[in-house]
Amino acid sequence: MTQKVRIAIVGLGFGAEFIPIYQAHPNAELVAVCQRSEEPLNQIADHFGIAARYTDYARMLADPDIDAVHINTPIEAHADQSVAALDAGKHVACTVPMAVSLEDCARVVKAQEASGKSYMMMETAVYTREFLYTKQLVDSGELGRIQFLRGAHMQEMAGWPDYWEKMAPMHYATHAVAPLLALAGREAHSVRCLGSGRVNGRDPVGGLAFAVESALFQLRDSDLAMEVTRSLYDVAREYVESFDVFGERKSYEWQQLEREHPVVFTGEDGERVEIPDYADRLPAEIREFTTRGVYDATQNQHLSFTQGSGHGGSHPHLAHEFLMSILEGREPFPGVHASANWTSAGICAHESALTGAEVELPVFTNGEHSA
């Protein structure tokens, strides 16, 4: 008999993208959904035929039929809800970022270590087609020694929930930070960041309303450095979540426009490459979800899916990794310590932008993690 993990999804905006994936996965049983607003909760649950419905998160956590929760709620709730779920003995998948403060990152790490349950930050950027392709180049040795890494996440947040207006650019930097650290197989150690320009009419929590924040990171136990740039408002640029990796033999550079292909350089000679889909790494039942989204492809897709071109086909890979880590009794990738480092990188970068000083990241574990 196939082992199944009984999943509950919390938050049904972006979270709805994962409902059909879990329903189709041979090792998952989607048993419950949770959302504060009862009317849309019932609409979505009716559409997908889900019987167990909760508007109260604490009541949902008390349900003994739930093994794991997948959290897709507003950013400020991530730490509290993750800790509550871990304390309740549930495995946790949580959309990015882990938390909005270093203290809350530490709380999640402590709760995971105490519970022994899985915690996985569902970082789309380390399961995109582009990441999987570049990781092959790194793992095969084709790039040679990595010499430098660069990432950017530039996105116009108009039309998103109001709390985004209070957020500094680097407080949500994981999409740009994560693929660089994952490809390097290292954690961020310290950061020096500059803020540039101003965002009109907004006063973010924690200081000046920089239009752009750009940071240089030193990696822990490494001679490598990386550069990360992030913007949220008032910058004229097509949406981009990009990374570049410069190696001694080959380098990978993200395309300038979304409709183009990335470039791989061999020495000084560059050529555009078409990235494969990698759906063959998934169970057959969920392979279709690398190229299509939730139930209504024209009207009901979440902004994060449409702006990000489906997050590079990452959603079924994320769900599969979370489920398999539970069933195989191993740490997921990214696990709790990598997730804390990736999240705290942006928090510390914004602190550096405000103070002008280099900021050292906290160490959440003495152990090592790898991509």
Image (cartoon, rainbow, N blue to C red):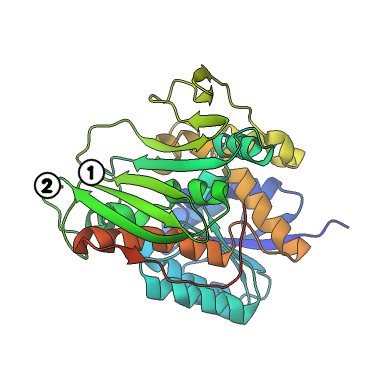
Identify which residue is drawn at 63% across, 45% down.
317
Between 369 and 290, the one lying in front of the other is: 369
Image position, residue 85 (x, y; %): 55, 74
Query: Is residue 25 rendered to the left or right of residue 149?
Result: right
Three-letter code, disc 2: Asn
Residue marked by disc 2 = 200
Residue marked by disc 1 = 233
How far apart are the alpha carbons under marks 1 and 2?
Answer: 9 Å
Q: Are marks 1 and 2 in contact (CB under 8 Å)?
A: yes
Mark 2: give few (<14), some (14-19) or many (20+) Cα within 10 Å: few
Three-letter code, disc 1: Tyr
Image position, residue 95 (x, y; %): 49, 56
| Element type where label 2 sits in the image | loop
Residue 22 in sight here: no
Please tell me how many numbered marks the rendered image carries: 2
Between 87 and 295, the one lying in front of the other is: 87
* Mark closer to the chain start, 1 or 2: 2
Identify which residue is drawn at 50% across, 75% down.
83
Quadrant in which the N terminus appears: bottom right
Residue 228 in sight here: yes
